Amino acid sequence: MGTESTNIPGSLLIDENTLRDLEVFKSETGGTCLFDVCNLTRTEGGRQALHRRMRLPWSTAAQIRSTQSAISFVLGQRQAFEKLPSAYVSNIVSQHYLREILPIITEENPIAFGVGVFGVWANRDSHHFIIVRGVQMTCLLLTTLRKFIAQPELLSASGEMASFVDEIRALLDRPALCAVPDKPIGSWLWKILRFDQVFRLHEKASLDRLIEIISEIDALTSMADVTSDCGFALPHIEEGALCVHAENLVHPLLTDAVANPLGLSQKQRTLFLTGPNMAGKTTYLRATALALLLAQMGMGVPASKFRFAPAQYLFTSISLSDDLSGGVSYFRAEALRVKAVALAVSQGYRVMALMDEPFKGTNVRDAIDASSSIIV
């Protein structure tokens, strides 16, 4: 039940049950989820890139540091990223031009090409308008990227951002894209359709990649803005065995939350949490898991200090339910959850598992015995 996960090398494994428990992408009550808090992106591509980063955080210290370094750079040079192409331009090029199924003139010969131009002019259908606007917006996007990349601040880009900046430069230096002028190209149909031929026939892969990079930078900028706006702390990343230490840790979706410490390591691998009903035990569990998820995305976390060595698998068992149609009782669902954790551990993964009132689907005596056996 809910144990499926996306297994991509270098990513933290999180199954759907855990995402649901933590309200990462959807709130149980229809309220704000973690993605809503972190999504300050401007573009649809940026939103999708942020969603992917949140669904597949990193699991190695090197990858996390690379993203964290990029976010630190954005925080230090925030004004430079205001010069990226606007959301309007980026969305038109990516969503309404490059992805549309549109007629294209493939002939290079001037006479054959001219015949094609006349055909487009004569038809004057909706495709004509989309192509003209798409070419004009693509030229504007390239011009804006040139101005963005020319900023001296970007010479010191670090981490992921340095790779993105270098790749933008390399793509813009392609001869066919260098030929695009910095001034508006107007509406002369011959010139428009020649550029359309370049953009959608010869350099589509280059433009698609530029859009992808803009989306990734949009996602990183959003992560930086949330880190700054919410007063999150950038964690210290350690090598070696899994550990998590925090001071003044709070749940990122709560206001006026009570802060708590956290300390887990190979010497103290189990934290047994007790307290009366409504004391905040489940909130503490969720805050711990969400902080680790955010940390492994490379962004800040809701704590005054946070240091950790990355996990490879994150499990929670907070809001399980039975499955009558599948013949799975509540107790069996809990047992299957524990089995999934044990399997991940036996396979050598570095596992963080958070369980809320384990084995509450059976009597107290059996629950104590079962809990004792898995804690040991």
Image: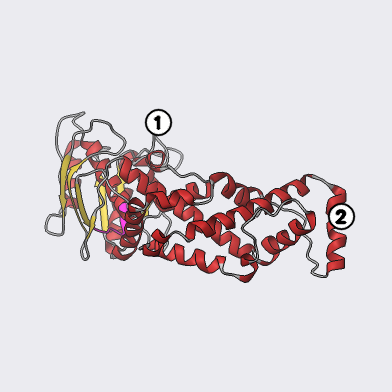
Q: Mark number for residue 226? A: none
Q: Where is residue 314 drawn, in percent x and y? A: 31, 52
Q: Residues within 10 Å of mark 2 (few under 14, many from 20)?
A: few
Q: Are marks 1 and 2 in contact (CB under 8 Å)?
A: no
- The residue positioned 46% from the left and 45% from the top of the image is 41
- The residue positioned 56% from the left and 65% from the top of the image is 172
Assign a secondary structure to mark 2. helix
Q: Find residue 154 and report its image quarter.
A: bottom left
Based on the picture, tell me whether residue 168 belongs to the magenta stretch: no
Q: Where is residue 329 drawn, in percent x and y? A: 35, 40
Front residue of this view, candidates 243 and 95? 95
Q: Which residues are magenta?
A: 309-314
> As drawn, is 360 to the left or to the right of 219?
left
Identity, as a three-letter code, of the amino acid under mark 1 = Gly
Identity, as a three-letter code, of the amino acid under mark 2 = Gly
> In the image, is residue 216 above or below residue 348?
above
- Residue most extreme to the front: 183
Q: Mark number for residue 31? A: 1
Q: Mark number for residue 119? A: 2
Q: In the rendered image, is residue 55 in sight?
A: no
Instruction: Report the Cα–Cα distance between label 1 and label 2.
Output: 53 Å
- The residue positioned 34% from the left and 40% from the top of the image is 320
Front of the two marks 1 and 2:
2
Q: How many callouts does the rendering have? A: 2
Which comes sooner in the sequence, label 1 or label 2? 1
Q: In the rendered image, is residue 151 in sight?
A: yes
Q: Quadrant of the C terminus?
A: bottom left
- Residue most extreme to the left: 267
Based on the picture, tell me whether residue 313 belongs to the magenta stretch: yes
Assign a secondary structure to mark 1. loop
Front residue of this view, candidates 25 and 42? 42
Front residue of this view, candidates 57 and 121? 121
